[in-house]
Image (spheres, rainbow, N blue to C red):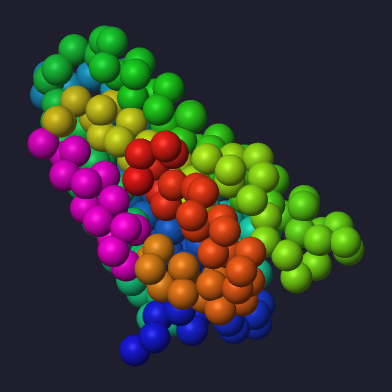
């Protein structure tokens, strides 16, 4: 199956997007219950509050992505896949983060800064592209400016930074497997499919962009 086909369908798919948003909202409620509705001996109330804030921030950002930035169809199979993935990760971080007896300290601060940076990179890059695309003279052309000059898929890079920071805030280093798996999914799944679509749509413009810009991690990969 050609995964790049999902990027060609521009139907609004409001029902599927609203369903995904509703499921994500329920996931956030589950996260809050895990963090505050269950007794956790020796765990930090501050850590749990910070993890709750990140879950809410991520949910808010996903809403913006679904209803503002994504202009293509979001199919039901994609809804199911994302819902399972987001639910698994959010609940996993909340569960083990709530049990952590590691003192809130420098790594928590680093993680918080990474969460904010990753969120800004993802949402900021999407906003830059949307504003540029709205100009009539740019219709049919590829946007390569702003943060997109650092990486061809800088929005995905922002997510990796965000989740790495979220894990650091949990006080459970073993959960760093999450951003590693996420990197693999982007690098070997989402990105190749998206690259095929972009090459088909923009042709020589994308070939030049591909040669001069990192795929995912700015200046590295």
Would residue 137 be seen by someone viewing this image from the given angle? yes
Q: Is residue 179 above or below residue 47?
A: below
Question: What residue appears at the point 50 percent right and 57 percent down from the top-left corner?
Answer: 210
Q: With 126 as the anchor, is 165 left or right in this view?
A: left
Q: Is residue 24 above or below residue 44?
A: below
Point out residue 150 in the picture as x, y percentages from the top left corner.
Answer: 52, 40
Give the image quarter of residue 71: bottom right
Question: What residue appears at the point 54 percent right and 64 percent down from the top-left corner?
Answer: 207
Residue lying furthest right: 136
Q: With 120 as the anchor, is 103 left or right in this view?
A: left
Question: What residue appears at the point 40 percent right and 80 percent down from the top-left corner?
Answer: 3
Q: Nearer the viewer, residue 33 or 69?
A: 69
Give the image quarter of residue 45: top left
Point out residue 142 in the picture as x, y percentages from the top left corner.
Answer: 67, 61
Q: With 10 as the anchor, is 56 left or right in this view?
A: left
Point out residue 129 in the picture as x, y percentages from the top left corner.
Answer: 68, 52
Please provide the residue range marked out in magenta. 174-189
- What count of labels does the image hold? 0
Q: Nearer the viewer, residue 86 or 205?
A: 205
Would residue 35 be seen by someone viewing this image from the given angle? no
Say whether residue 181 is magenta: yes
Q: Which secondary structure dominates the residues rendered in magenta?
A: helix
Question: What residue appears at the point 46 percent right and 74 percent down from the top-left corner?
Answer: 196
Q: Is residue 123 above or below residue 6?
A: above
Image quarter (top left, top right, bottom left or bottom right) of the N terminus: bottom left
Point out residue 168 in the picture as x, y percentages from the top left corner.
Answer: 25, 28
């Amino acid at each position: 199956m050609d995964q790049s086909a999902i990027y060609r369908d521009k139907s609004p798919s409001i029902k599927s997007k609203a369903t995904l948003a509703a499921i994500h909202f329920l996931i956030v409620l589950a996260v809050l219950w895990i963090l505050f509705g269950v007794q956790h001996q020796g765990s930090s109330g501050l850590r749990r509050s910070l993890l709750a804030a990140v879950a809410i921030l991520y949910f808010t950002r996903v809403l913006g992505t679904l209803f503002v930035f994504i202009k293509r169809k979001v199919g039901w199979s994609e809804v199911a896949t994302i819902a399972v993935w987001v639910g698994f990760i959010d609940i996993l971080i909340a569960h083990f983060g709530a049990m952590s007896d590691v003192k809130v300290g420098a790594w928590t601060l680093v993680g918080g800064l990474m969460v904010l940076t990753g969120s800004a990179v993802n949402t900021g890059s999407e906003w830059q592209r949307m504003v540029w695309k709205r100009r009539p003279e740019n219709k049919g052309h590829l946007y390569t400016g702003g943060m997109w000059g650092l990486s061809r898929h800088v929005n995905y890079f922002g997510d990796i930074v965000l989740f790495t920071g979220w894990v650091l805030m949990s006080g459970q280093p073993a959960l760093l497997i999450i951003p590693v798996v996420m990197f693999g999914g982007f690098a070997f799944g989402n990105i190749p499919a998206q690259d095929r679509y972009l090459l088909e749509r923009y042709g020589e413009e994308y070939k030049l962009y591909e040669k001069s810009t990192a795929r995912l991690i700015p200046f590295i990969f």
